[in-house]
Image: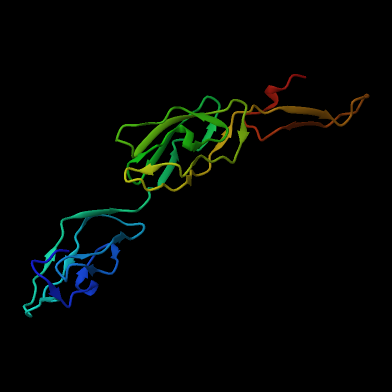
Amino acid sequence: ITFSEAVKDFSNADVTAPNGTLSTLASTDGGTTWTATFTPNANVEVAANSISVNPGAYSDLAGNTGSAAASGNYAVDTQGPTASITLSDNALTAGESAQVTIVFSEKVTGFGNTDVAVENGTLSTLATTDGGKTWVGSFTPTAGTADASNVMSVANSYTDVAGNQGASTSSANYAIDLKAPTASIALSDNALKAGESATVTITFSEKVKDFSNADITE
C-alpha cells in the first residue's frame, strides 16, 4: 500500500481484505509504503474482491486525514470441485447398457477413464462437450453377471482449472442381472407302483416368471 506521503496511525485495522487474511503491515521507508502478505481463505470461490483502506483512519505527519482507497479486483478460488454420477438405468438386464453422466461443480482438468472405478462392466471413453464440466460415457455390464450391489466411483485425482484438488464420490447403487436361471427337478418317489403318485418339486436358482405346466415335458 503506497501513500502519497508518510502517514501515521495506520495499521491492519484500517484495511479490509475480503475472503482472506493480511499479515501485519510494515513500513521500511518511514510510513509511505506498507507491505504485507495476503493469504486467501480455504474453500472460497469469489471472483470479485478488492482490498480497501478505510477513509479517515490515518493521517499524514501534519495531521491531515487521509481518504479511502481500493485495489484493483482480485479473484479467490481455493474451493475444490465436486462431482455427481448418474446412470440412465439402475437395473440392467440382458442386452441393456446405461448412459453414465458425470457432472462436476465446475470445469476440471486431468480427468479421464482412469479416474473412474467401475464394478462388473466396462465404461466407454468419457467425452465432454462443454469444456470439462459434464462427461458422458456408456456402461456395458459384463456378460453372465448377477450382482445386486454395484457402485461407480470417481477418485480425487482431478483438479479444477485453478489447480484445486477434487473430491472423490460414488454413484447410487445399480443392479446387474445377466445370468439365466437354472432349475432342478426332484420327485418324492422314484419307483412308483400302481395307485401311487409323487410330488414333483422344481427349484430354480432364482425367482422366475411366465412359468407353467406348458413348459414341462413329461
Q: Position of residue 181 (x, y in %)?
A: 67, 28
Along the line of sight, the residue nearer the viewer: 184 or 55: 55
Q: Is residue 129 above or below residue 1?
A: above
Q: Residue at x 50, y 38 (%)?
A: 90
Quadrant of the rendered structure where residue 16 is?
Answer: bottom left
Q: Residue at x 8, y 71 (%)?
A: 67
Q: Give the left or right position of residue 72, taking residue 203 as reference.
A: left
Q: Position of residue 4 (x, y in %)?
A: 8, 66
Quadrant of the rendered structure where residue 175 is?
Answer: top right
Q: Is residue 39 above or below residue 126?
A: below
Q: Give the left or right position of residue 94, taking residue 48 as reference.
A: right
Judged from this view, the residue extending furthest toward the bottom is 63
Q: Position of residue 33 (x, y in %)?
A: 16, 65
Q: Quadrant of the N terminus?
A: bottom left
Q: Position of residue 176 (x, y in %)?
A: 57, 34
Along the line of sight, the residue nearer the viewer: 121 or 110: 110
